[in-house]
Amino acid sequence: MTQGSNLIRPRDGTGAEYWLGHCEGFGVYADDRFLGTIEYVRYESDHRRPDVLGMRCGGIGRPERLLPVTAVDALDPDEEVVLVTGEFARSLPVSWTQVLRARLGATRAGSFGIFG
């Protein structure tokens, strides 16, 4: 997924505010597992740094989750990827599609037209 060459870590104070505020459309991953896509950025306590990222889990009509920026481990602007902590990923409910994908394998499930 990402080689780590251009990783920006918000906790290191490396000026991640810009990319946290401009990460709409970035894919969200935890341990090489795709969790969703950033749909919007919400500023609440400080106009320079967002507090929450709105994440769409799956396709159209799939649930939306709020991702606190404190759960962001790193961003890779070149790959358009947000990496989150394992703790946040474990807090998300497991969907039936994830269970089916794990049991059948992504390739086999995709061949049945279950996953796009």
Image (tube, helix red, strand yellow):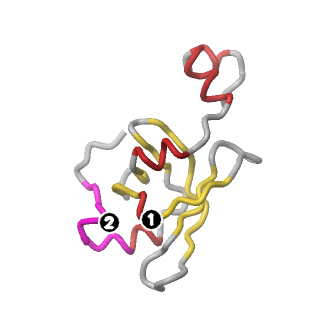
Is residue 18 shown to the viewer in this render? yes
Q: What numbered label is drawn on residue 51?
A: none
Q: Residue at x 57, y 44 (%)?
A: 92
Other-residue count near label 2 (Cα within 10 Å), few / some / many at <14 / 14–19 / ≥20: some
**Residue 53 image-quadrant placement:** bottom right
- Residue 110 x, y percent position in the rendering: 63, 21
Q: Which part of the image, by quadrant, shows the N terminus? A: top left
Q: What's under tag 2, amino acid-wise?
A: Pro
Is 101 magenta? The answer is: no
Give the main secondary structure of the magenta stretch: loop
Which residues make up the magenta segment? 6-17
Secondary structure at badge 1 equals helix
- Residue 62 x, y percent position in the rendering: 72, 46
Q: Residue at x 66, y 28 (%)?
A: 97
Q: Is residue 43 above or below residue 12?
A: below
Asked if the residue under mark 2 is in contact with the one under mark 1, i.e. CB atoms within 8 Å, the reply is: yes
Mark closer to the chain start, 1 or 2: 2
Q: What numbered label is drawn on residue 10?
A: 2
Q: Is residue 99 above or below residue 72?
A: above
- Residue 28 x, y percent position in the rendering: 48, 49
Q: Is residue 36 above or below residue 48?
A: above
- Residue 63 x, y percent position in the rendering: 70, 49
Front-most of 34 and 91?
91
Front-most of 44 and 76?
44
Q: Residue at x 57, y 73 (%)?
A: 42
Is 15 magenta? The answer is: yes
Mark 1 — residue?
69
4 lies left or right of 94: left
Q: CA distance from mark 1 to mark 2?
A: 8 Å
